[in-house]
Every structure is written in structure tokens, then in C-alpha cells.
Image: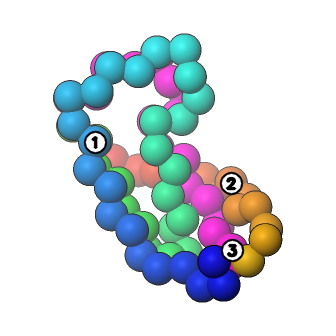
Amino acid sequence: CSSQCKRNVYVEGVTAYGGGEIVGINSNYGDTATLKNVCTDAKVKCQMYTGCAGGCEPSKSGVCSG
């Protein structure tokens, strides 16, 4: 897409093992993520990215708080 918009994700009652991150959000677009009752061995439950528009890949910019 040539432009991006804010996204809100809600994850509840999920079991996830052996993977990477549970969710990834673009902090510069105002994305939010809410995780409730999530069982996982993931080191990072919510990864923040600096999103970009067009044919580029977002870069990691930190870990979500809370």
C-alpha cells in the first residue's frame, strides 16, 4: 500500500509456543495491541516497529510496554 493507517488488535485466550513474537505493531502509526489470557514461551509478546509505506520492510523500534 502507498499509505498506512492505525490498527488495533485484541488477542484473548491464545496458546502459542515455539514461535517468535505474538503481535507486532507500528508505533509511528498509532497501532495498539491488547493481550489477555495469553500462554506463550515467546520472549517478546509485543514487538514495536517503525512502519513504512510502499515496498519497504518496517524496522524494530522496541518492545511494547504493559
Choose the circle earlier in sequence order: 2 or 3: 3
Please say if the residues under marks 1 and 3 sit with CB atoms less than 8 Å apart: no
Name the residue at 60% across, 85% down. 3
In the displayed structure, 54 sits above or below 22; it is below
Q: Amino acid at mark 1?
A: Val
Q: Is residue 49 left or right of residue 7?
A: right
**For mark 3, what is the residue?**
52
Residue drawn at x 41%, y 21% as measured from the top left = 16
Task: List x then y, in percent, for residue 59.
Answer: 73, 59
* Along the line of sight, the residue nearer the viewer: 47 or 5: 5
Q: Which residue is mark 2?
A: 60
Residue at 54% x, 35% y: name it: 21
Q: Amino acid at mark 2?
A: Lys
Picture coordinates of residue 12 (x, y %)?
21, 36
User: Which one is in front in this view, the residue at disc 2 or the one at disc 3?
Assistant: 3
Say if residue 8 shows up in the picture: yes
| Residue 18: quarter of image | top right
Res 11 label: 1
Q: Position of residue 40 (x, y in %)?
A: 40, 20
Spatial CA span between label 2 and label 3: 12 Å
Local packing at callout 2 (Cα closer than 10 Å; few below 14, some 14-19, many 20+) is: some
Residue span colored magenta: 37-53
Report the amino acid beneath label 3.
Cys
Position of residue 16 in the picture relative to residue 62 (left or right): left
Residue 49 percent across, percent down from the top left: 61, 59
Alpha carbon of mark 1 to alpha carbon of mark 3: how far? 24 Å
**Up-down: is 58 above or below 42?**
below
